[in-house]
Image (cartoon, rainbow, N blue to C red):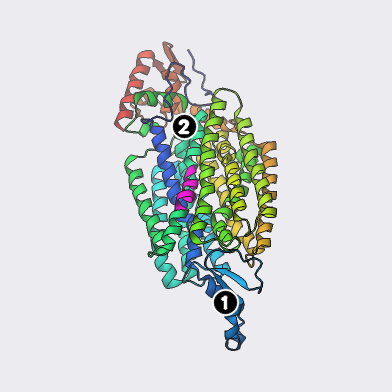
Amino acid sequence: MALDTKPPVKRAVSRPDVKKFPFFHPFSRRLHICLLCMAGFCCTTFMRMHIAITMTCMINSTALALENTVFPEAIDSNTSSIFEEVELVSNGACSSTNDNNKKVVVDYGGQLVWNSQEQNLIFSGTFWGSIITVLPSMFFINRYSPRYVLQAAVGCYILMTAITPYIATHFGPYPVFISRVIMGLGEGFILPANNAILANWFPSAERSTAISLFTTGNQMAGAGGNPVAASLCASSFGWPSIFYFASIVSTIWSVCWFLTASNQPSKCKVMTKTEREYLDANVVRRSNKTNRSLVVPYAKILKSPAFLAQLLCQFVINSIVTLLQIYLPNYFKDVLHLGVIANGTYTSIPNIVNFALKIVWGIAIDKAKENKTISGTFAVKLSQSIANFGGALFMILITFYVDCTNPTLGFLFFCMMYGCMGTLVSGFYTSLLSLAPKYTATMSSISVFCAMMGRLSTPAIVGLIKKENTLSEWQTLFLVCAAANIVCGVVFLLFGSGELQEWGEEDEVKETKAFGEKTPLASIQNLRADSEDNDVFQSALDMDIPEIQLNEITLTTEERQRFQRRIREDSMCL
């Protein structure tokens, strides 16, 4: 019997006799991998983003305000009047209607006098670094182990975070910017490496749940990291302890990752037989080793409306998220006049809301897809619409109804906005991993490049609009974000997709034929379980037919059984 060399849409073999192994199970190895990825993402996000609230503790706001108030040529004659122009607010009281028209300053007791331009430069440092490495990252991940690539990237984070306090206190803002750029070199590998690992471990029906769980590391960094940073800032240890704490926790994660993680199920040393069989039958398999024969259809990828729609979402969403992560503590301090502990609380609780909604929504949407209630495309469009249009609505409400007289109302609106954004990963992010799983690393690198451009644009946009950190300037920023959200939502509704694209299958056929033309029968019997070529014959192994002919290669039932036993034995030894 001749074997049709054209593979199915997924290179996973559909076997109804294979028992499903639940995702949420104490012995679920893919759950363990997802939790490890989540913890790592939490560590890297905290190391990158805690600078937002830490900066409010590093800066001497009073000295900076005085510096901006006094003209150099009038320092001596105006010394007595300087302090009449600056009012120090330490209790977070709202003074937006100060009777004496004094400039209100909320000071957390910092020592460094860095102006807003220097602060914006430091905030943008990691984004500049990631721009350099994000596109080359796809070649590294396609050729080398994503597990070790991720390990090296996190190591870069840890080193730069640990030395930042020394650089800041001894050398000033520009060397700190350089250290942040070096940190960003590692950031360009973080998401592509994680995406490649998750694509290897999870069936498509579980992907929204897995992505939701993985990306909650972002919210955990905000929900847990901001209060910790605020507490350390207010403690006798001071702001340098925030950097040291982040480095120590991330080092612990790095050791755990090195000892327990694996790129794909076939490389896993500890896994139940039931789960291994379930993943073999349901996961689209791709190699994480060198694959020089892989031909990536760049032209078709870059012309795909669905891919371009999610690229727009990457840019817009990352720009908005960066504004919220980096500048929101500054908004709570200088506009709503909150103290440092209240600032940490107000920036953390919305992340908890986002965390909860993300998990609940991801599970619900995957359940609906599994039951065939909705299609993959409907699921991603619905999720993206809630995030974009809901987020825009609450940004508009914050613009017109929130000031320092009612910070609690602003807090509630931010919680609701973050809740809407909890559906994001079931939208454009799930779309990214669904369009062509075979090219996950390549598309992730392109997407992360757009995401980094969005992040990089945020300090520039903020610098153009926010000159004196006034309420009206923040209102303008929120309206710009609301408009961008609406445009993004409309475009994704029109062009977004959650289904495998035609160009995502074509090269798999070519690769299968090419293998059949060049691999002799003798080598088939000696293939190891981690060989890229195993995937080509996986469907043949499970067919109940006496003999299979693939070009010049003949496999009898007995030979297929021996080959299958060899694969499984090698898998258990890896």
The spot of residue 314 in percent (x, y) is 59, 46
Q: Nearer the viewer, residue 218 or 99?
A: 99
Residue drawn at point x = 34 percent, y = 26 percent: 272
* 412 over 274 or under it: above or below: below
On-image quarter of the C terminus? top left
The spot of residue 481 in percent (x, y) is 66, 52
Q: Which mark is residue 487?
A: none
**Marks 2/1: CA–CA distance:** 56 Å
The spot of residue 331 in percent (x, y) is 59, 59
In terms of image quadrants, where is residue 103? bottom right
Residue drawn at point x = 42 percent, y = 32 percent: 532
The spot of residue 431 in percent (x, y) is 58, 36
Nearer to us of marks 2 and 1 is 1
Seen as rendered, the residue at the extreme left is 573
Q: Which residues are magenta?
A: 216-225
Horizontal side of residue 400 vs 351, given as left or right? right
Label 2 element class: loop
Label 1 element class: helix
Q: Nearer the viewer, residue 390 or 526?
A: 390
Which residue does the numbered mark 2 point to in the structure image? 202
**Magenta region, mostly helix, strand or loop?**
helix
Q: Disc 2 residue type?
A: Phe
Quick check: can you spot residue 313?
A: yes
Which residue does the numbered mark 1 point to in the structure image? 66
